[in-house]
Image (cartoon, grey):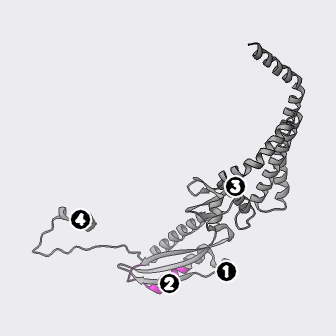
Amino acid sequence: MDKITNKLDTWKDIFIKNIPNIAIALVVIFIAYFASRAINTFISKTLGKKIKQESVRNLVSRVASAFIFLLGLYIAMTVLKFDDTLKAIISAAGVSGIVIGLALQGTLSNTISGVVLSFRENLNIGNWIETNGYSGQVMDINLNYLVIKEADNNTVVIPNKTILENPFKNYSLTTKMRIALECGVEYGADLERVETLTKEVINNTFNQEKLGKNVEFYFTEFGDSSINFLCRFWIESEDALERLRGKSNAIIKIKQAFDKENISIPFPMRTLEILPNQSLDIHKLTEKEVS
């Protein structure tokens, strides 16, 4: 008990003796923390006028913020006279760095990939992309992963390495998208009138002349109950949602125009012929035959 008491007294004396240093170290860490946040905001605003890519601005501001905080932490440890401890840590880091590097190979790969993605001009925050089976708006590009928000508001986190090693489609690189719309009309319809009417509806709705494009219209086949056609046109869009809205709007307008001109869009029908000497048992028909 005497040894324990003496040890505690020694620690108490050391603590009391170093109270000024501890107070200074805490102040330094406190200042470094808020300085790092201020630097982050300042660099983001300053670079915002010169660098258009938000991902690059975020990367630079985060690195600068981390550097300021680590610098403050180093000064605080120096004030507490942990110089020998720092030297020991740095010496050990050289030996253990190889082991840690091998263990964190995937993490380091994602970090390097994050730096590469941040400087890519064909990928930026706010773009609508499709990659690795997911499609959505890029919300963040950091040193470990990329975050996208899908159309259903779900958030998807994808490792940077996966993005870099696989192709992706960026809908935001162009302001124009082409929509392909397939439909069919009855066999008794005036096909020339169908083509003219469809082109007029698309031109009036989406103004192809302003986009410098033309409406493409092709009859594709004699179907079982209709003559089918393909209509392709362009819209102003930078994401897949606008493409869906454009296609939906085109379907509504074409249906309204066809109804006004008494042009039917047929659907498959089945006719059952019952001979006079045959009976029909409805209970023995399959669901498909009944429909």
Viewer-closest of 166 and 146: 166
Q: Which of marks 3 and 4 is nearer the N terminus?
A: 3
Secondary structure beneath label 2: strand
Q: Which of marks 3 and 2 is nearer the N terminus?
A: 3
**Amino acid type assigned to the residue bearing label 2 in the image:** Tyr
Q: Which residue position is annotated with label 4?
A: 286
Image x and y of residue 233, in percent: 58, 77
Do labels 4 and 1 touch, CB within 8 Å? no
Q: For the residues marked 3 and 2, what is the alpha-carbon distance in whole angstroms?
A: 53 Å
Disc 2 residue crowd, few under 14, some 14–19, many 20+, Cα 10 Å: few
Amino acid under disc 1: Gly
**Which is nearer the eye, 90 or 192?**
90
Residue range highlighted in magenta: 185-199
The residue positioned 55% from the left and 55% from the top of the image is 152
- The circle drawn on residue 108 is 3
Q: Can you say which quadrant of the picture contains the C terminus?
A: bottom left
